[in-house]
Image (tube, rainbow, N blue to C red):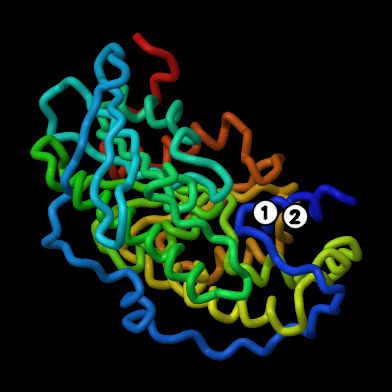
Amino acid sequence: MNRTVLMIAFFLAVLGTFTAVGAAVQTEPKPAAPPDLATLAKQFDYDKAKPLDIEDKVVAQRQGYSIHEITYASPVTGRVPAYLLIPESAGPHPAVLFGHWGGGDYTEFLAEAEIYARAGAVCLLPDYPWVRPRKWRRTVQNFDKPEQDREIYAQAVVDMRRGIDLLFARPDVDRARLGYIGHSYGAQWGAILTAVDRRIQAAVLAAGVPNLDAIFLREGDADLKELLKQFPPGQLEKYLDVQSQLSAVNYVGHSAPAQLLFQFAAFDPNFNRDAMESYFKAASEPKKILWYDAGHELADPQAVLDRYAFLSGPLKLAAKPVLTER
């Protein structure tokens, strides 16, 4: 089994189990025109009057900043675990919100967030509902219940919006300097956030996908086609149709005036270059695209440096990052 299929199998494992019945996947459906943005945005409405109810514990003290493990109340259900990095100086500080990839957790960007904290930025790294402690976890596991999965994914975005509320409630945060960095699913949330929440000035969308069709309905991969035969007839098509309400490509054209940096992996096994280029083409201006000789993880140090260089302008950070503690 090739690497692409192994990645797809892992993606399926992240989402959950499905019934193996050996039925062939149906032909690619003709997608309906997406709803307008105002209709799509209603999925991410929440009660802004609810208390944040922050619980805070300092877990590390570094030179010039501290690292906190916090939780805050989700407007949907449960609590949101997160790291919060706070510079020691008085501010006002820029802020950076991070969105990890779907199979990871809030530790993914912790080391990178420290670079921004050393540059004087308050950083927030929330966890998604399906990787939280059991008492707050909402597992995405049913291809036969696509509406349930869509609602849980939408909660991830709502909880990120609530994270912006948390940042803006801090007197040491400059509300005119908010950046976002998201990888994979985090890039999808970033496309949505910049369209439905105008508080982000600049966003990095790393190794993102325009929609799930770009993963599941690609041509030319016999192993992938064989794997997808395990879906009952019509189940995958319905699942993709329901999840299309969260497709990043439906939102990314409405991101202006936020600046967008797209970072793509030239050797990403999950989707092809045509899908990535069409995603970038659909985005609103101002936008920029960069390519890296890397896989989906984008494990290229230059990608980290390029993100910082991109955000340093709108966030008014020091021109060069401090990669180690002073």
Secondary structure of the residue carrying tag 1 is helix
Q: x, y (%) of residue 166?
A: 20, 46
- Amino acid beneath label 2: Ala
Residue highlighted by disc 1: 13
Picture quadrant where residue 67 is located: top left
Quick one: SS at disc 2?
helix
**Residue identifier under label 2:** 9
Residue 102 pos. (x, y %)? 54, 50
Frontmost residue, 37 versus 290: 37
Q: Nearer the viewer, residue 220 or 326?
A: 220
Left or right relative to 13: residue 87: left
Tell me the kind of residue under disc 1: Ala
Q: Position of residue 286 (x, y in %)?
A: 40, 60
Q: Which mark is residue 237?
A: none
Residue count near mark 1 (Cα–Cα under 10 Å), binned few <14, some 14–19, many ≥20? some
Question: Residue 25's x, y, as percent?
Answer: 80, 78
Q: Is residue 183 left or right of residue 190?
A: right
In the visual, does 114 lie left or right of 235?
left
Q: CA distance from mark 2 to mark 1?
A: 6 Å
Instruction: Name the residue located 32 percent from the left edge and 61 percent from the top edge.
Output: 158
* Mark 2 Cα shell of 10 Å, populated few (<14), some (14-19), many (≥20): some
Residue extending furthest toward the front:
135
Q: Are marks 2 and 1 in contact (CB under 8 Å)?
A: yes
Which quadrant would residue 270 be assigned to in this image?
Answer: bottom right
> Relative to residue 174, is residue 187 depicted above or below?
below
Q: Is residue 136 above or below residue 41?
A: above
- Point 28% across, 57% down: residue: 161
Q: In the image, is residue 226 above or below residue 34?
A: above
Is there any visible trace of residue 151 in the rendered image?
yes
User: In front here: 59 or 165?
Assistant: 59
